[in-house]
Image (tube, rainbow, N blue to C red):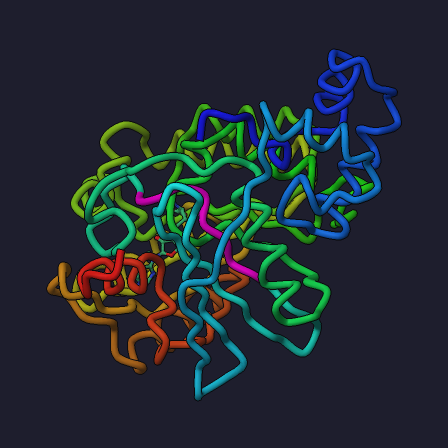
Amino acid sequence: MDKTDLKSLEIEELEEIFLKLGEKKYRAAQAFKWMHQKMVSSIDDITELPQGLRDKLNSNYRVSNLKIAERLDSKQDDTIKYLFVLDDGNVIESVMMKYKHGTSVCLSTQVGCRMGCEFCASTKSGLVRHLLPGEILEQFYQIQKEQNISISNVVLMGSGEPLDNYNNVMKFFKIIHDKNGQNLGYRHITISTCGLVPRIFDLADEGIPINLSISLHSPFDEERKKIMPIAKKYSIREIMEACSYYIAKTNRRVTFEYTLIKDVNDHQKDALEIVKLLKGMLCHVNLIPLNTIKEFSHTKSNEKSVLKFKDILLKNGINTTIRREMGADVNAACGQLRRDYIERGYS
Ligand code: SAH
Protein backbone atom coordinates (compact mmCIF):
# COMPACT_ATOMS: atom_id res chain seq x y z
CA MET A 1 0.00 0.00 0.00
CA ASP A 2 3.01 2.28 0.32
CA LYS A 3 3.46 2.49 -3.42
CA THR A 4 1.98 5.61 -5.04
CA ASP A 5 -1.24 5.00 -6.96
CA LEU A 6 -0.76 6.19 -10.54
CA LYS A 7 -4.53 6.18 -11.13
CA SER A 8 -4.91 8.95 -8.54
CA LEU A 9 -2.66 11.38 -10.41
CA GLU A 10 -3.47 14.14 -12.85
CA ILE A 11 -1.67 14.08 -16.16
CA GLU A 12 0.82 16.81 -15.14
CA GLU A 13 1.82 14.81 -12.08
CA LEU A 14 2.35 11.72 -14.21
CA GLU A 15 4.51 13.74 -16.58
CA GLU A 16 6.77 14.74 -13.68
CA ILE A 17 7.17 11.10 -12.66
CA PHE A 18 8.02 9.97 -16.18
CA LEU A 19 10.52 12.78 -16.64
CA LYS A 20 12.17 11.89 -13.31
CA LEU A 21 12.47 8.31 -14.51
CA GLY A 22 14.30 9.61 -17.56
CA GLU A 23 11.38 8.86 -19.87
CA LYS A 24 9.70 10.99 -22.52
CA LYS A 25 6.78 13.18 -21.47
CA TYR A 26 4.34 11.63 -23.97
CA ARG A 27 4.55 8.34 -22.07
CA ALA A 28 2.52 9.99 -19.31
CA ALA A 29 -0.35 10.73 -21.69
CA GLN A 30 -0.24 7.14 -22.91
CA ALA A 31 -0.36 5.76 -19.38
CA PHE A 32 -3.17 8.18 -18.48
CA LYS A 33 -5.27 7.09 -21.46
CA TRP A 34 -4.82 3.41 -20.67
CA MET A 35 -5.81 3.94 -17.04
CA HIS A 36 -8.72 6.32 -17.62
CA GLN A 37 -10.07 5.43 -21.06
CA LYS A 38 -9.26 1.76 -21.36
CA MET A 39 -9.70 1.49 -17.59
CA VAL A 40 -6.93 -1.09 -17.07
CA SER A 41 -6.37 -2.60 -13.64
CA SER A 42 -2.60 -2.97 -13.49
CA ILE A 43 0.64 -1.41 -14.72
CA ASP A 44 1.32 -4.60 -16.70
CA ASP A 45 -1.90 -4.06 -18.65
CA ILE A 46 -0.57 -0.75 -20.03
CA THR A 47 0.91 -2.65 -22.95
CA GLU A 48 1.67 0.49 -24.96
CA LEU A 49 4.55 1.11 -22.54
CA PRO A 50 7.71 -0.95 -23.13
CA GLN A 51 8.16 -3.90 -20.75
CA GLY A 52 11.26 -2.33 -19.20
CA LEU A 53 9.35 0.81 -18.31
CA ARG A 54 6.48 -1.20 -16.85
CA ASP A 55 8.97 -3.10 -14.67
CA LYS A 56 10.52 0.18 -13.55
CA LEU A 57 7.07 1.56 -12.66
CA ASN A 58 6.07 -1.60 -10.82
CA SER A 59 8.89 -1.25 -8.33
CA ASN A 60 7.66 2.08 -6.96
CA TYR A 61 4.11 2.50 -8.17
CA ARG A 62 0.80 0.69 -8.37
CA VAL A 63 -2.61 1.18 -9.94
CA SER A 64 -5.77 1.15 -7.80
CA ASN A 65 -7.95 -1.82 -8.53
CA LEU A 66 -11.33 -2.61 -6.99
CA LYS A 67 -12.89 -6.05 -6.93
CA ILE A 68 -16.61 -6.68 -6.96
CA ALA A 69 -17.47 -8.54 -3.75
CA GLU A 70 -21.22 -8.54 -4.26
CA ARG A 71 -23.74 -7.36 -6.79
CA LEU A 72 -27.40 -6.95 -5.94
CA ASP A 73 -29.94 -6.40 -8.67
CA SER A 74 -33.18 -4.74 -7.69
CA LYS A 75 -36.29 -6.62 -8.69
CA GLN A 76 -38.32 -3.41 -8.59
CA ASP A 77 -36.34 -1.25 -11.00
CA ASP A 78 -33.06 -0.95 -12.89
CA THR A 79 -30.98 -0.28 -9.80
CA ILE A 80 -27.88 -2.35 -9.13
CA LYS A 81 -25.91 -2.10 -5.94
CA TYR A 82 -22.22 -3.02 -5.89
CA LEU A 83 -20.06 -3.84 -2.94
CA PHE A 84 -16.37 -3.40 -3.75
CA VAL A 85 -13.28 -4.63 -1.92
CA LEU A 86 -10.38 -2.15 -1.86
CA ASP A 87 -6.73 -3.19 -2.12
CA ASP A 88 -6.43 -3.06 1.71
CA GLY A 89 -9.51 -5.24 2.30
CA ASN A 90 -11.91 -2.43 3.24
CA VAL A 91 -15.30 -2.52 1.56
CA ILE A 92 -17.31 0.29 0.00
CA GLU A 93 -20.53 0.47 -1.94
CA SER A 94 -21.79 2.15 -5.09
CA VAL A 95 -25.15 2.20 -6.84
CA MET A 96 -26.01 2.25 -10.52
CA MET A 97 -29.39 3.64 -11.58
CA LYS A 98 -30.76 3.48 -15.11
CA TYR A 99 -33.04 6.34 -16.11
CA LYS A 100 -34.71 7.15 -19.40
CA HIS A 101 -32.12 9.88 -20.02
CA GLY A 102 -29.05 7.81 -19.14
CA THR A 103 -27.22 5.92 -16.47
CA SER A 104 -26.25 7.48 -13.21
CA VAL A 105 -23.88 6.18 -10.55
CA CYS A 106 -23.76 7.05 -6.90
CA LEU A 107 -20.19 6.77 -5.59
CA SER A 108 -18.61 6.62 -2.15
CA THR A 109 -15.85 9.03 -1.17
CA GLN A 110 -14.77 7.62 2.19
CA VAL A 111 -14.76 4.29 4.02
CA GLY A 112 -17.28 5.17 6.72
CA CYS A 113 -17.91 8.79 7.69
CA ARG A 114 -17.31 11.02 10.69
CA MET A 115 -20.26 13.38 10.30
CA GLY A 116 -22.52 11.39 12.62
CA CYS A 117 -25.96 12.07 11.09
CA GLU A 118 -28.42 10.11 13.24
CA PHE A 119 -30.35 8.53 10.37
CA CYS A 120 -27.39 7.50 8.22
CA ALA A 121 -25.92 3.98 8.25
CA SER A 122 -22.57 5.07 6.74
CA THR A 123 -21.50 6.93 9.83
CA LYS A 124 -22.35 4.37 12.50
CA SER A 125 -18.77 3.05 12.89
CA GLY A 126 -17.08 6.38 12.21
CA LEU A 127 -14.50 7.19 9.56
CA VAL A 128 -12.09 4.41 8.59
CA ARG A 129 -10.23 6.34 5.88
CA HIS A 130 -10.52 8.67 2.92
CA LEU A 131 -10.74 7.14 -0.55
CA LEU A 132 -8.01 7.99 -3.05
CA PRO A 133 -9.05 9.67 -6.30
CA GLY A 134 -8.20 6.37 -8.05
CA GLU A 135 -10.56 4.46 -5.77
CA ILE A 136 -13.43 6.84 -6.48
CA LEU A 137 -12.71 6.55 -10.22
CA GLU A 138 -12.47 2.78 -9.99
CA GLN A 139 -16.08 2.49 -8.80
CA PHE A 140 -17.11 4.27 -12.01
CA TYR A 141 -14.78 2.19 -14.21
CA GLN A 142 -15.72 -1.16 -12.70
CA ILE A 143 -19.44 -0.52 -13.18
CA GLN A 144 -18.89 0.76 -16.70
CA LYS A 145 -16.85 -2.32 -17.62
CA GLU A 146 -19.16 -4.80 -15.93
CA GLN A 147 -22.26 -3.32 -17.53
CA ASN A 148 -20.59 -2.53 -20.84
CA ILE A 149 -22.19 0.91 -20.84
CA SER A 150 -21.20 4.53 -20.87
CA ILE A 151 -22.21 6.24 -17.63
CA SER A 152 -23.67 9.71 -18.15
CA ASN A 153 -24.02 11.09 -14.62
CA VAL A 154 -22.15 10.87 -11.34
CA VAL A 155 -23.46 11.75 -7.91
CA LEU A 156 -21.21 11.74 -4.86
CA MET A 157 -23.94 10.59 -2.51
CA GLY A 158 -22.59 7.23 -1.41
CA SER A 159 -20.80 6.68 1.88
CA GLY A 160 -18.71 9.52 3.22
CA GLU A 161 -18.71 13.29 3.25
CA PRO A 162 -17.06 14.36 -0.04
CA LEU A 163 -16.03 17.79 1.25
CA ASP A 164 -14.27 16.11 4.18
CA ASN A 165 -12.01 14.44 1.58
CA TYR A 166 -11.64 17.66 -0.36
CA ASN A 167 -8.33 17.31 -2.21
CA ASN A 168 -8.95 13.75 -3.38
CA VAL A 169 -12.46 14.61 -4.54
CA MET A 170 -11.16 17.63 -6.52
CA LYS A 171 -8.61 15.36 -8.20
CA PHE A 172 -11.38 12.90 -9.00
CA PHE A 173 -13.32 15.71 -10.73
CA LYS A 174 -10.33 16.84 -12.78
CA ILE A 175 -9.38 13.31 -13.86
CA ILE A 176 -12.90 12.20 -14.82
CA HIS A 177 -13.36 15.46 -16.74
CA ASP A 178 -10.03 15.15 -18.60
CA LYS A 179 -10.42 14.72 -22.36
CA ASN A 180 -7.79 11.97 -22.23
CA GLY A 181 -9.96 10.17 -19.69
CA GLN A 182 -13.74 9.88 -19.57
CA ASN A 183 -14.28 13.49 -20.70
CA LEU A 184 -17.33 13.75 -18.43
CA GLY A 185 -18.85 17.24 -18.36
CA TYR A 186 -18.87 18.99 -15.00
CA ARG A 187 -22.59 19.60 -15.39
CA HIS A 188 -23.08 15.83 -15.19
CA ILE A 189 -21.49 15.67 -11.76
CA THR A 190 -23.21 16.36 -8.44
CA ILE A 191 -21.62 16.66 -5.02
CA SER A 192 -23.70 16.28 -1.89
CA THR A 193 -22.65 17.73 1.46
CA CYS A 194 -24.05 17.97 4.97
CA GLY A 195 -22.78 21.57 4.95
CA LEU A 196 -19.04 22.07 5.48
CA VAL A 197 -19.31 25.81 4.95
CA PRO A 198 -15.63 26.78 4.36
CA ARG A 199 -15.28 23.95 1.82
CA ILE A 200 -18.38 25.15 -0.06
CA PHE A 201 -16.65 28.51 -0.51
CA ASP A 202 -13.49 26.72 -1.67
CA LEU A 203 -15.51 24.66 -4.12
CA ALA A 204 -17.13 27.79 -5.54
CA ASP A 205 -13.65 29.23 -6.13
CA GLU A 206 -12.45 26.13 -8.06
CA GLY A 207 -14.19 27.41 -11.17
CA ILE A 208 -15.76 24.06 -12.01
CA PRO A 209 -19.52 24.19 -12.63
CA ILE A 210 -20.58 20.99 -10.85
CA ASN A 211 -23.99 20.66 -9.20
CA LEU A 212 -24.11 21.31 -5.48
CA SER A 213 -26.56 19.51 -3.26
CA ILE A 214 -27.04 20.41 0.41
CA SER A 215 -28.42 17.98 2.98
CA LEU A 216 -30.73 20.30 4.88
CA HIS A 217 -33.15 17.99 6.72
CA SER A 218 -34.44 20.80 8.95
CA PRO A 219 -34.83 24.56 8.44
CA PHE A 220 -34.37 25.18 12.20
CA ASP A 221 -30.85 25.13 13.68
CA GLU A 222 -31.99 23.68 17.01
CA GLU A 223 -33.87 20.84 15.32
CA ARG A 224 -31.12 20.23 12.81
CA LYS A 225 -28.58 19.89 15.63
CA LYS A 226 -30.58 16.95 17.01
CA ILE A 227 -30.15 14.88 13.85
CA MET A 228 -26.99 16.34 12.26
CA PRO A 229 -24.01 17.09 14.55
CA ILE A 230 -22.44 19.33 11.86
CA ALA A 231 -25.23 21.81 12.61
CA LYS A 232 -23.49 22.59 15.89
CA LYS A 233 -20.55 23.91 13.89
CA TYR A 234 -22.26 25.75 11.03
CA SER A 235 -25.61 27.48 11.14
CA ILE A 236 -28.22 27.37 8.40
CA ARG A 237 -27.61 31.08 7.81
CA GLU A 238 -23.93 30.37 7.12
CA ILE A 239 -24.88 27.54 4.75
CA MET A 240 -27.23 29.89 2.88
CA GLU A 241 -24.47 32.49 2.52
CA ALA A 242 -22.15 29.84 1.14
CA CYS A 243 -24.86 28.67 -1.29
CA SER A 244 -25.51 32.20 -2.52
CA TYR A 245 -21.79 32.59 -3.14
CA TYR A 246 -21.78 29.26 -4.99
CA ILE A 247 -24.67 30.33 -7.20
CA ALA A 248 -23.08 33.71 -7.90
CA LYS A 249 -19.81 32.05 -8.90
CA THR A 250 -21.15 29.12 -10.93
CA ASN A 251 -24.64 30.18 -11.97
CA ARG A 252 -25.74 26.66 -11.06
CA ARG A 253 -29.01 25.84 -9.32
CA VAL A 254 -28.42 24.40 -5.83
CA THR A 255 -30.43 21.40 -4.65
CA PHE A 256 -31.56 20.99 -1.05
CA GLU A 257 -32.06 17.40 0.01
CA TYR A 258 -34.67 16.91 2.67
CA THR A 259 -35.23 13.48 4.19
CA LEU A 260 -38.71 13.36 5.62
CA ILE A 261 -38.85 11.76 9.07
CA LYS A 262 -42.26 11.19 10.62
CA ASP A 263 -43.09 13.70 13.38
CA VAL A 264 -39.51 15.00 13.39
CA ASN A 265 -39.20 17.36 10.42
CA ASP A 266 -42.40 16.86 8.39
CA HIS A 267 -44.65 19.49 10.02
CA GLN A 268 -46.34 22.34 8.21
CA LYS A 269 -44.12 24.79 10.12
CA ASP A 270 -41.04 23.10 8.67
CA ALA A 271 -42.33 23.50 5.13
CA LEU A 272 -43.22 27.16 5.73
CA GLU A 273 -39.79 27.87 7.18
CA ILE A 274 -38.13 26.27 4.15
CA VAL A 275 -40.16 28.65 2.00
CA LYS A 276 -38.85 31.64 3.98
CA LEU A 277 -35.32 30.35 3.69
CA LEU A 278 -35.28 29.56 -0.02
CA LYS A 279 -37.68 32.05 -1.54
CA GLY A 280 -36.08 33.80 -4.50
CA MET A 281 -33.03 31.55 -4.56
CA LEU A 282 -31.94 29.64 -7.69
CA CYS A 283 -32.68 26.27 -6.11
CA HIS A 284 -34.69 23.11 -5.97
CA VAL A 285 -35.85 20.87 -3.12
CA ASN A 286 -35.62 17.11 -3.33
CA LEU A 287 -37.77 15.35 -0.75
CA ILE A 288 -36.41 11.93 0.24
CA PRO A 289 -38.53 9.39 2.09
CA LEU A 290 -36.46 8.13 5.07
CA ASN A 291 -34.91 4.75 4.48
CA THR A 292 -35.29 3.16 7.89
CA ILE A 293 -32.17 1.73 9.52
CA LYS A 294 -32.13 -0.24 12.74
CA GLU A 295 -29.87 2.26 14.53
CA PHE A 296 -32.46 5.06 14.13
CA SER A 297 -35.81 4.50 15.75
CA HIS A 298 -37.87 6.87 13.61
CA THR A 299 -39.87 6.00 10.51
CA LYS A 300 -40.57 7.72 7.23
CA SER A 301 -43.40 10.21 6.89
CA ASN A 302 -46.58 8.79 5.49
CA GLU A 303 -47.46 9.45 1.89
CA LYS A 304 -50.14 11.98 2.78
CA SER A 305 -47.76 14.18 4.74
CA VAL A 306 -45.11 13.91 2.04
CA LEU A 307 -47.58 15.14 -0.59
CA LYS A 308 -48.82 17.90 1.72
CA PHE A 309 -45.26 19.01 2.41
CA LYS A 310 -44.50 19.10 -1.30
CA ASP A 311 -47.70 21.00 -1.95
CA ILE A 312 -46.85 23.77 0.52
CA LEU A 313 -43.45 24.24 -1.09
CA LEU A 314 -44.83 24.23 -4.63
CA LYS A 315 -47.68 26.64 -3.81
CA ASN A 316 -45.10 29.03 -2.44
CA GLY A 317 -42.97 28.94 -5.54
CA ILE A 318 -40.28 26.48 -4.45
CA ASN A 319 -39.35 23.91 -7.10
CA THR A 320 -39.85 20.56 -5.44
CA THR A 321 -39.63 16.91 -6.40
CA ILE A 322 -39.96 13.68 -4.46
CA ARG A 323 -37.08 11.30 -4.95
CA ARG A 324 -38.17 7.96 -6.32
CA GLU A 325 -37.38 5.20 -3.87
CA MET A 326 -35.08 3.26 -6.14
CA GLY A 327 -33.62 -0.06 -5.20
CA ALA A 328 -35.27 -0.15 -1.78
CA ASP A 329 -35.10 -3.96 -1.92
CA VAL A 330 -31.30 -3.93 -2.34
CA ASN A 331 -30.54 -1.72 0.67
CA ALA A 332 -29.74 1.19 -1.60
CA ALA A 333 -29.55 3.74 1.22
CA CYS A 334 -25.98 4.79 1.91
CA GLY A 335 -23.93 2.47 4.02
CA GLN A 336 -26.58 -0.14 4.64
CA LEU A 337 -25.13 -2.83 2.44
CA ARG A 338 -21.59 -2.37 3.75
CA ARG A 339 -22.79 -2.66 7.34
CA ASP A 340 -24.79 -5.77 6.58
CA TYR A 341 -21.78 -7.29 4.88
CA ILE A 342 -19.47 -6.54 7.80
CA GLU A 343 -22.03 -7.79 10.33
CA ARG A 344 -22.45 -11.01 8.37
CA GLY A 345 -18.71 -11.49 9.01
CA TYR A 346 -17.42 -11.68 5.46
CA SER A 347 -14.79 -9.00 5.66
N1 SAH B 1 -22.24 13.23 3.22
C1 SAH B 1 -23.04 13.66 2.11
C2 SAH B 1 -23.52 12.50 1.26
C3 SAH B 1 -24.47 11.64 2.03
S1 SAH B 1 -25.59 10.59 1.27
C4 SAH B 1 -24.23 14.47 2.61
O1 SAH B 1 -24.44 14.52 3.80
O2 SAH B 1 -24.92 15.08 1.79
C5 SAH B 1 -26.76 11.49 0.38
C6 SAH B 1 -28.05 11.86 1.07
O3 SAH B 1 -28.76 10.78 1.67
C7 SAH B 1 -27.85 12.89 2.16
O4 SAH B 1 -28.81 13.91 2.01
C8 SAH B 1 -28.13 12.11 3.41
O5 SAH B 1 -28.48 12.94 4.46
C9 SAH B 1 -29.21 11.18 2.95
N2 SAH B 1 -29.41 9.99 3.78
C10 SAH B 1 -28.53 9.33 4.53
N3 SAH B 1 -29.11 8.30 5.17
C11 SAH B 1 -30.40 8.30 4.80
C12 SAH B 1 -31.52 7.48 5.12
N4 SAH B 1 -31.41 6.46 5.96
N5 SAH B 1 -32.71 7.78 4.55
C13 SAH B 1 -32.82 8.82 3.68
N6 SAH B 1 -31.82 9.63 3.36
C14 SAH B 1 -30.61 9.38 3.91
Helix, strand or loop for the magenta stretch, by majority = strand
- Location of residue 36 (image quadrant): top right
- List x then y, in percent, for residue 180: 82, 41
The image quadrant where one finds ligand 1 is bottom left
Please tell me which residue is depicted at 25% across the width and 61% down the height of the picture: 346
> Which of these two is toward me, 208 or 15?
15
Please tell me which residue is depicted at 51% across the width and 58% down the height of the picture: 106
Please tell me which residue is depicted at 23% across the width and 56% down the height of the picture: 119
In this rendering, is residue 207 above or below 77?
Answer: above
Is residue 223 visible in the rendered image? The answer is yes
- List x then y, in percent, for residue 17: 71, 18
Looking at the image, residue 322 sits to the left or right of residue 283; the answer is left
- List x then y, in percent, for residue 82: 45, 65
* Magenta-span inclusion, residue 114: no
Q: Which span of residues is magenta-colored? A: 105-112
Is residue 281 visible in the rendered image? The answer is no
> Which of these two is toward me, 280 or 208?
208
Q: Quadrant of the N terminus?
A: top left
- List x then y, in percent, for residue 261: 24, 64
> Which of these two is toward me, 205 or 185?
185
Looking at the image, residue 111 sits to the left or right of residue 183; the answer is left
Q: Quadrant of the C terminus?
A: bottom left
- Location of residue 2 (image quadrant): top left
Please tell me which residue is depicted at 41% across the width and 53% down the height of the picture: 85
In this rendering, is residue 347 above or below 168?
Answer: below
> Which of these two is toward me, 147 or 283?
147
Q: Residue furthest bottom?
A: 75
